[in-house]
Image: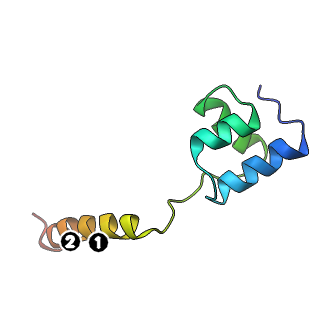
């Protein structure tokens, strides 16, 4: 069982769940061992995984994926 005991650890989880810090930073700041511990800690504290940041790079990848996939889904290829 992952023990999140300090307010600072919980705040780190909240910031991570909000997508404001990266995975590695969250693991280090919360004093966790690995990604599995991070997922468990989020779950134990009723927090969800963050959504990807809406950066220009993310938007470009999303547009590219849509351009490739949507025509195929429309035509059942």
Q: Is residue 11 left or right of residue 23?
A: right
- Under circle 2, the secondary element is helix
Using the image, determine if residue 27 lies above or below residue 20.
Answer: above
Using the image, determine if residue 77 lies above or below residue 25.
Answer: below
- Under circle 1, the secondary element is helix
The numbered mark at residue 67 is 2
Kindly report the distance in space between the C-alpha atoms of the residues bearing marks 1 and 2.
6 Å
**Residue 46 at x, y percent in the picture:** 76, 50
Using the image, determine if residue 14 lies above or below residue 35.
Answer: below
- Nearest the viewer among 65 and 72 is 65
Crowd rating for badge 1 (residues with CA inside 10 Å; few <14, some 14–19, many 20+): few
- Which of the 4 image quarters holds residue 4? top right
Q: At 68% from the left edge and 35% from the top edge, which residue is drawn?
A: 28
Which quadrant: the N terminus?
A: top right
Residue 71 visible within the image: yes
Q: Is residue 45 left or right of residue 48?
A: right
**Residue 53 at x, y percent in the picture:** 51, 63
**Residue 17 at x, y percent in the picture:** 66, 54
Which residue is labeled 1 in the image? 63
Q: Residue furthest right?
A: 6
Using the image, determine if residue 66 lies above or below residue 30.
Answer: below
**Residue 24 at x, y percent in the picture:** 59, 39
Residue 46 visible within the image: no
Pointers 1 and 2 in contact (C-beta within 8 Å): yes
């Amino acid at each position: 069982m992952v023990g999140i005991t300090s307010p600072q650890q919980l705040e780190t989880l909240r910031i991570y769940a909000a997508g404001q810090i990266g995975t590695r930073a969250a693991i280090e700041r919360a004093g966790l061992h690995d990604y599995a511990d991070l997922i468990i800690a989020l779950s134990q504290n009723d927090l969800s995984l963050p959504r990807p940041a809406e950066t220009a790079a993310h938007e470009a990848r999303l547009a590219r994926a849509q351009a490739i996939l949507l025509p195929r889904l429309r035509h059942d290829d």
